[in-house]
Image (tube, rainbow, N blue to C red):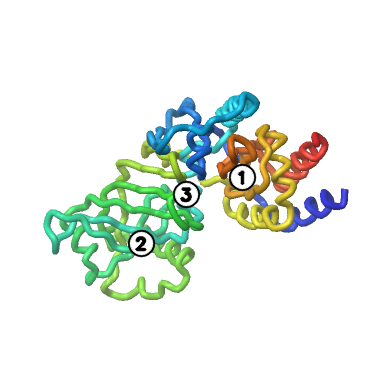
Amino acid sequence: MTMLFVLSCSLLMTIRHFKPASSFQFPRLTTFSSKLSRTFSISSTKSDDSEKSSTGHQSPGSAPAVSPEDELIIAKFRENQSKAAKLPMAVEVRSLIDQSICYGTLATNSVQFEGYPTGSIVGFELNDEGNPFFVFSTMSAHTRDVQKDVKASLTILAKDFKGAAEGRVVLIGDVQKVDPANTEVIANLRAKYLARHKDAYWIDFGDFSYYLMHKIVGIRFVGGFAMAGSISPEEYYAAKPDPIAPFAGPVMKHMNDDHSDSTIAMVKHYAGVACSEAQIVSLDSMGMTVKAKLEVAGGGFAKVRLPFPRAVTERKQVKEVLVEMTRAAAGSE
């Protein structure tokens, strides 16, 4: 009871106000261990949106031999994960961009090196519709590039990006200069850019101008190993960032630092697989994803999706469902 009381109180201190999420879809398991990747491979389960596509990645070698008991556990685990609620890809994309540092790699068709693309690290922000905009100097090579050829792409990494297991988004579209005579639009963009990039005093220098990816023709998303797909511009514009995203990090840190034993118990209770280590690596309005060291089929790390019993729609509900799930997992042991 003491542990549950501490969990309840400390989570309450980390959670702020948020709005409800709208919908969800079914995910696939993403594995870290090549041994488990072969053993726990789950075929693609398409949602009604048909958003995600399998990458077709296959681990080298044959699957490890497993006992009949482990085969039964694995089969149940696959079924469990195939039905686990997850955010729609469009919401994942908008959330990743919203929580990024708003710097990305702008790829343009080079004027200097004709026939070759070049990349530049640029700051950006989104306008009210969700289109990225920039403030470019006339001295920059990418400025000359988009003046000649508007076709470009912007690659954005997740805030916690450390390698191929983390998410990234590519926006493909046309980048053009914003008419400086449209002072109302410029004023709106300036305010948004400075709110995101507070030290960007240079945007008022005379040789800087605003550029906008006014037309998005495609969006690619990679959420980690073997999790990739694309969404349409219409899906992108219709989606909003997940309301939990702004404070998911502190909640996960608290759980990982102080209550990893509770997460281990939840993996066993809700996913049906015992594990010896568990760290929450993502948390959203529909549930959480845990990187767990599973104790089956020889062991290894895998990402395990643990849906919440209900979508969180009000303040305090993240705390409430985590305490509820902790209590249920503890009671089943």
Disc 3: CA contacts within 10 A as few (<14), some (14-19) or many (>=20): some
Reading the chain from its start, which is encountered first: label 2 or label 1? 2
The type of residue carrying mark 1 is Lys
**Type of residue at label 3?**
Ala
Residue denoted by label 3: 165
**Horizontal and vertical percent for residue 198?**
47, 70
Residue pointed to by mark 2:
186
Q: Which residue is mark 1?
A: 293
Mark pair 3, 1: CA separation = 16 Å
For the residue pair 268 and 200, the one nearer the viewer reads as 268
Q: Residue at x 48, y 27 (%)?
A: 45
- Name the quadrant containing residue 109: bottom left
The numbered mark at residue 118 is none
Q: For the residues marked 2 and 3, what is the alpha-carbon distance in whole angstroms? A: 38 Å
Give the residue at x 73% y 44%: 322
The reply, left or right, for residue 122 in relation to residue 277 is left
Residue 183 in the image: x percent, y percent? Answer: 34, 62
- Name the amino acid, label 2: Ile
Task: Give yes or no for contact between labels 3 and 1 (Cβ–Cβ under 8 Å).
Answer: no
Tell me residue 281's x, y (percent). 58, 49
Give the x, y percent position of residue 308. 67, 37
